[in-house]
Image: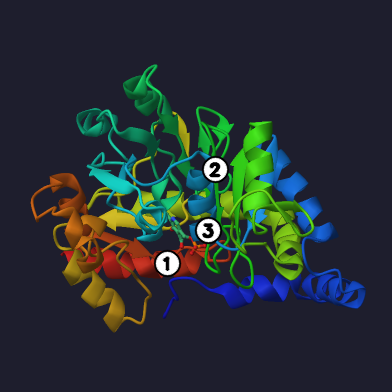
Amino acid sequence: MGVPLVDLQLQYQDIREEVMAAFDEALSSMRLALGPNVEAFEQEFSEFSDVKHTIGVGSGTDALQLLLHAHGIGPGDEVVTSSFTFIATIEAIMLLGATPVLADIEPDTYCLDAAQVAEKITPRTRAVMPVHLYGHPADMDAIAEVIGDRDIVLLEDAAQAHGALYKGKPAGGLADGAAFSFYLSKNLAAYGEAGAITVEDDDLDEVIRALRVHGSLEKYVHRLIGYNSRIDELQAAVLRIKLRRLADWNEARRRHAARYNEQLCNLPDLTIPVEKEWAWSVYHVYTIRSPRRDQIAEALNAAGIGNAIHYRVPCHLQVALRDLGMSAGSLPETERAANEVLSLPMYPELTNEQIDSVCEVVVDAML
Ligand SMILES: Cc1ncc(COP(=O)(O)O)c(C=O)c1O
């Protein structure tokens, strides 16, 4: 039985009528720039994430950049983050002229390791930005403890973690601000590019609202040099429809992860995803690790089963980042993970039969 890595069509069939009606309403009104859907979505996402403010922007990458910008990060500043992430985490820092300082990860959660962060802090460090990778939250308290009372902000790259809980509290409200992506395949996904920033602080909220529209809160009056990064009304309309279902979809992902775990937990040379006792992961992806990863991927490909490596080349070894001067061997846990991880099909509409057939292929490949 072939199984796709992600199936976005099934979800669309479920919500098609609502989406069409919402699009028609928005298009008929022609209030397409920061209109009623954006305003309502921002409020609804704030409630969902238990934060005071949500600011919708053009993408997750923009969300990271505007969040860092609003915190005053710029040339000469260092931001400690993970190398085991999508490149956008690092790009946002570099686009502001700041320097990414890449620390190693915990080998079980793949998130930033607080002890490694401690080694990377210098007098120039202005922010630490862990990534809640694969939908599992980073250990925010451990990182906050390392920062101590230094003048360093703690931010979240929550692009993969809509609805994930850390010690019972949702991602997005765990520190001094968070960035979300609503890219097509995310747990909460638009039908185009979109992202959001969540913050508690009223002043930051105001600055970010200005930054997303050319530094302006009043038409043609510009108090800052900003960006053109509005979330558009059609994307906000889709996100509102999907947000109402997100808790159920995240539960479904967790059920699928449990079913995978049951069948894959006792294989030699294969490690199933870890969920810390303080975490409630939303399994943006379901990622196993094995030194025999390529053998498993080959068997899955032969059976028509989707799989992916998140991420094959860690950021510090990307050509684009060669000026950082980090060579192979500098982040051993990150590099080991990059050589061993493999993501299996994961989306809410996955069936038990599909999961069982994926597991059968994985188990056979390990014999
Ligand atoms: C961890 C992480 N950070 C940032 C981004 C950037 O988001 P976007 O693609 O919406 O710009 C993504 C996803 O694409 C991501 O997975």
Res 255 seen here: no
- The alpha-carbon separation of the residues under discs 1 and 2 comes to 37 Å
The answer to which image quadrant residue 13 occupies is bottom right
Kindly report which numbered mark, 1 or 2, lies closer to the viewer in this rendering.
2
Q: Residue 345 carries which label?
A: 1
The residue at which mark 3 appears reads as 62
Q: What amino acid does circle 1 point to?
A: Pro
Residue 39 appears in the picture as rendered: yes
The percent coordinates of residue 313 (x first, y second) are 22, 63
What residue did someone put label 2 on? 70
Circle 2 packing at 10 Å, graded few (<14), some (14-19), many (20+), is some
Mark 3 or mark 1, which has the lower sequence index?
A: 3
What is the distance, in whole Å, between disc 2 and disc 3 at their CAs? 12 Å
Extreme residue toward the top, this view: 149
Question: What residue is drawn where x is 66% and y is 34%?
Answer: 203
Occupied quadrant, residue 200: top right
Question: In what quadrant of the picture does the C terminus appear?
Answer: bottom left
| Percent coordinates x, y for residue 303 in the rendering | 32, 81
Question: Circle 3: is it few (<14), some (14-19), or many (20+) Cα within 10 Å?
Answer: many
Depth order, front residue of 362/89: 89
Q: Nearer the viewer, residue 180 or 19?
A: 180
Percent of width and height locating residue 8: 57, 73
Q: Nearer the viewer, residue 66 or 7?
A: 66
Relative horizontal placement of residue 122, taking residue 261 as reference (left or right)? left
Q: Say which of marks 3 and 1 sits in front.
A: 3
In the rendered structure, which amino acid carries the disc numbered 2? Ala
Q: Earlier in the sequence, mark 2 or mark 3?
A: 3
